[in-house]
């Protein structure tokens, strides 16, 4: 089972969140939240205050936001089309576009071509794609939890060059 700085000590052995970071997904994150619920808003001196009072609550808030984001987007589009008032929709696009352009302006690499800035609004579409992926993973993990179906974790054996099964020497 891989370990790393992202895995809490107990999670290295019991939580699927650290079994495989690529396949654990949302279910592993929720299992880790459940296993370490005592860390949320902990006043114990041995726990990092930034972790317990800021990062963990923001992680839960992010999961709640993802679970409701599709409904917010549907409401935004429905409201805009039913009332023919696209100002709320356009203001959302303007905020996201501004964030993109500010990030690109303050980027350390100043060698971006003009076409890079023209392609930047594609990020708006990528937000929808990542929202869909996160949302489907969120509800798939809820469904598997309710049906008591646990994922089968894969075991990987690291191999160096020339040590794979299809290597011909």
Image (tube, rainbow, N blue to C red):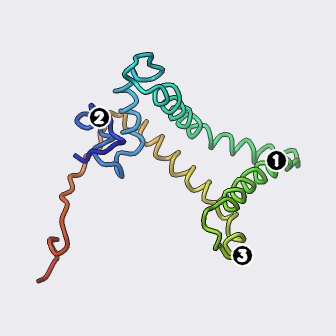
Q: Residue at x 33, y 39 (%)?
A: 7
Residue 160: percent from left, percent from top: 19, 68
Circle 2: element type: helix
Residue 1: percent from left, percent from top: 22, 46
Residue 76: percent from left, percent from top: 75, 44
Left or right: 169, with 129 as reference point: left
Circle 3: element type: helix
Looking at the image, residue 115 lies above or below residue 100: below
Name the residue that disc number 1 marks: 80
Name the residue that disc number 2 marks: 11
Residue in the foreground of this view, choosing between 101 and 13: 101
Name the residue that disc number 3 marks: 114
- Closer to the eye: label 2 or 3: 3
Residue furthest toward the bottom? 169
Circle 1: element type: helix
**Mark 1–mark 3 distance (CA, rounded to whole Å):** 32 Å
User: Which quadrant is home to the C terminus?
Assistant: bottom left
Callout 3: few (<14), some (14-19), or many (20+) C-alpha neighbours within 10 Å?
few
Q: Residue at x 81, y 49 (%)?
A: 91
Residue furthest toward the left? 169
**Mark 2–mark 3 distance (CA, rounded to whole Å):** 46 Å
**On the image, which quarter does residue 149 sit in?**
top left
**Mark 1–mark 2 distance (CA, rounded to whole Å):** 45 Å
Of mark 2 and mark 3, the one earlier in the sequence is 2
Looking at the image, residue 164 lies above or below residue 57: below
- Closer to the eye: label 1 or 2: 2
Looking at the image, residue 150 lies above or below residue 156: above
Residue 39: percent from left, percent from top: 41, 23
Residue 18 numbered tag: none
């Amino acid at each position: 089972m891989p370990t790393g700085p992202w895995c809490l000590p107990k999670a290295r052995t019991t939580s699927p969140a650290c079994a495989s970071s690529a396949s654990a997904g949302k279910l592993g994150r929720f299992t880790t939240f459940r296993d370490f619920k005592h860390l949320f808003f902990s006043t114990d001196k041995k726990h990092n205050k930034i972790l317990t009072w800021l990062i963990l609550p923001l992680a839960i808030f992010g999961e709640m936001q993802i679970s409701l984001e599709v409904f917010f987007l549907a409401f935004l589009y429905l409201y805009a089309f039913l009332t023919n008032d696209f100002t709320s929709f356009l203001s959302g696009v303007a905020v996201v576009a501004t964030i993109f352009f500010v990030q690109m302006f303050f980027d350390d690499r100043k060698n971006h071509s003009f076409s890079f800035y023209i392609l930047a609004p594609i990020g708006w579409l990528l937000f929808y794609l990542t929202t869909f992926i996160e949302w489907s993973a969120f509800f798939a993990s809820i469904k598997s939890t309710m049906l008591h179906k646990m994922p089968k974790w894969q075991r990987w054996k690291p191999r160096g060059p020339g040590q794979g099964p299809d290597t011909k020497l």
